[in-house]
Image (tube, rainbow, N blue to C red):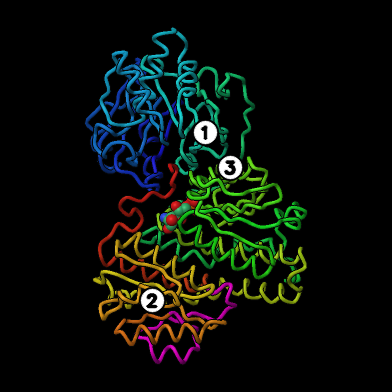
Amino acid sequence: MCGIVGYIGWREAWPILAAGLHRLEYRGYDSAGVAVVAADGELKVCKSRGRVDELERMAASHDVTGRVGIAHTRWATHGEPNDRNAHPHCSASGGLAIIHNGIIENHAVLREALEAEGYGFRSDTDTEVIVQLIEYIRDRSGCSLIEAVRGALGELVGAWAVAVVERGEAGRIIAARKSSPLVVGVGEGEFFLASDATPIVEYTDRVVYPADGQIVELSLAEGLRVTDMAGNEAGVEIEQLRLSISQLEKGGYPHFMLKEIFEQPGTVVDAIRGRVDAGLSEVVLSGVRDNRERFLGARRIVIVACGTSWHAGLIGEYMIEEMCRVPVEVEYASEFRYRDPVIEPGDVVIAISQSGETADTLAAVEMARGRGAFIFGVCNVVGSSIARATHSGAYIHVGPETGVASTKAFTGQVTVLMMLALAVGRLRGSVTAEFVADKIKHLCALPGQIAGILSRAAEVADLAKNFTYARNFLYLGRGYSYPAALEGALKLKEISYIHAEGYPAAEMKHGPIALVDSEMPVVVIATTDGVYEKTINNIREIKARGGRIIAVVDHDDTVVRGIADHVIEIPRTCPHLAPVLASVPLQLLAYHIAVNKGRDVDRPRNLAKSVTVE
Ligand code: AGP
């Protein structure tokens, strides 16, 4: 989703802004643009539909020199993706330029009011309203730019991260955020601004995360100043960034997604590291230990998340109910936040989010927090909005995930949820020490088992060749394998654009079986667990109707092998962790089918990595 970059300092801004836009490409976008203030105060804007490469080509024939600038990648919400709607947007006089990530819900009424005052609009965006409003306030009252920005933001309903530059003012950028991410990098005599830390990391490891409702002034003369919406000074807390450039590169892989799939033996180790005691008998999660009364007293647990994180949440539900004997509900954050749910003090809400910036999950957290629930975050991005809005949590520590299709974050989330269930189960006395020790053994075996699956990746690549031209896919599983089936289907559809549905295997007979014919590949996760025999019956039902079965089975399975058209073997583990192992070959299957179809695997159409609008 939209990406923001800004620079002010002693270097030429454009090369830094262009590199930053490339770093933010993974978020998904359809146009890009830049505004630079030259040394003589001239404000130069250059923008176009399409990729950052196109903007760079365009900028090569425009003068974009200057040491102060803002740049943007736009993921269209209001108005189609074209040159006109690309950011930056300028005020009527051309004296101000703005970039924006978020949605202004009351843009129509503000636009109407400004039009009535004689302001003309050049785009269909909600963003243009903000810059016109800033200029209107300043023209009418003669106030300073920051006061006009504060006044305009006070009129807005919605979410924003904005950055504003001004003609004639080659020494200042004003930025602000509410419910959309923004990070400030603090260098020597220079400042950086971005939607996340990836464009900043090669210049400085000192960052400031402005809080919701704060306004940031970056000035060459006066340094960094942070104020709130009332104009009160806010403290500036500089944090150290723990991110390296090598984590942001492809490292020889053709796509980030493939690199991230292959990183999983290491990322699962990172998720477990320091959380299992030396005797391999206890899980120690500081977020649980420090809040033991909350988990002991919990009447119920509600999990909120979106997409892949929601699938991990479903596995978390099964684990926590089984091991902690406390009722768990899993909610799509987007539904939860708007349906007036019963949330009371004493409830524990677990928010799962890779990016930590998903707008619906953040809003769900804020609502539940407002109603007195204890909020526990399972996030990847350290310092992200959701991580900061929670009372406590456990990071999954899988490193930056750049491919739009989530892979290593999913396996990291399931790993952390398993540890959470074990820690809380032990706390509540609902699982024995022996049970925990046995599960720790399985957890510690995961990295080696994933490495084993990856060593046979070529077999999945071969298999994928048979299905490149399939038009539909079904993914089935029961018990813990059901969420893994949902996740397998999501991976395939988002990067290959093949229609794929995940279903509980037994639900087949209640409708979807009507779709099965000899053209229909059906992926069934049939690992050995309490419902293995039942899953075999479901496979037979599909075969009887001519369906083509691709079965994910334990390496020593003999029964399903005799019925399925193709098998993908995975090592044996406990049922709780089988989704981690099953998801790895399904990630590879989706990846290779998408590559065979020539899809843009890391940046699939219409999708954004960080969904920062609802
Ligand atoms: C996964 O492959 C997706 N692209 C998407 O469903 C994602 O999981 C969802 O948008 C939630 O994101 P989050 O984990 O960053 O909150």
Q: Is residue 282 above or below residue 538?
A: above
Q: Residues within 10 Å of mark 3 (few under 14, many from 20)?
A: some
Q: Which residue position is annotated with label 3? A: 367
* Disc 3/disc 1 C-alpha distance (Å): 27 Å
Give the label on residue 523, or none: 2
Q: Residue type at mark 1: give it.
A: Val
Can residue 403 be seen at all in this image of the molecule? no
Q: Nearer the viewer, residue 13 or 598?
A: 598
Which-is-in-front pick, marks 2 and 1? 2
Q: Which residues are magenta?
A: 552-578
Can residue 433 be seen at all in this image of the molecule? yes
Pinpoint residue 285: horizontal percent, then vertical percent: 70, 58
Decide if residue 560 is on the left or right side of residue 595. right
Ligand 1 lies in which image quarter?
bottom left
Q: Verify whether residue 558 appears in magenta.
A: yes
Q: Residue shown at 30%/52% (left/top)?
A: 605
Q: Residue type at mark 2: give it.
A: Val
N-term-proximal mark, 3 vs 1: 1
Element class at badge 2: strand
Q: Residue shown at 36%/73% (left/top)?
A: 511
Pinpoint residue 539: horizontal percent, then vertical percent: 40, 84
Decide if residue 394 is on the left or right side of residue 249. right
Q: Residue shown at 50%/54% (left/top)?
A: 332
Pinpoint residue 198: horizontal percent, then vertical percent: 47, 44
Q: Verify whether residue 28 appears in magenta.
A: no
Q: Residue type at mark 3: give it.
A: Met
Q: Which residue position is annotated with label 1? A: 184
Give the label on residue 587, or none: none
Q: Is residue 140 above or below residue 107?
A: above
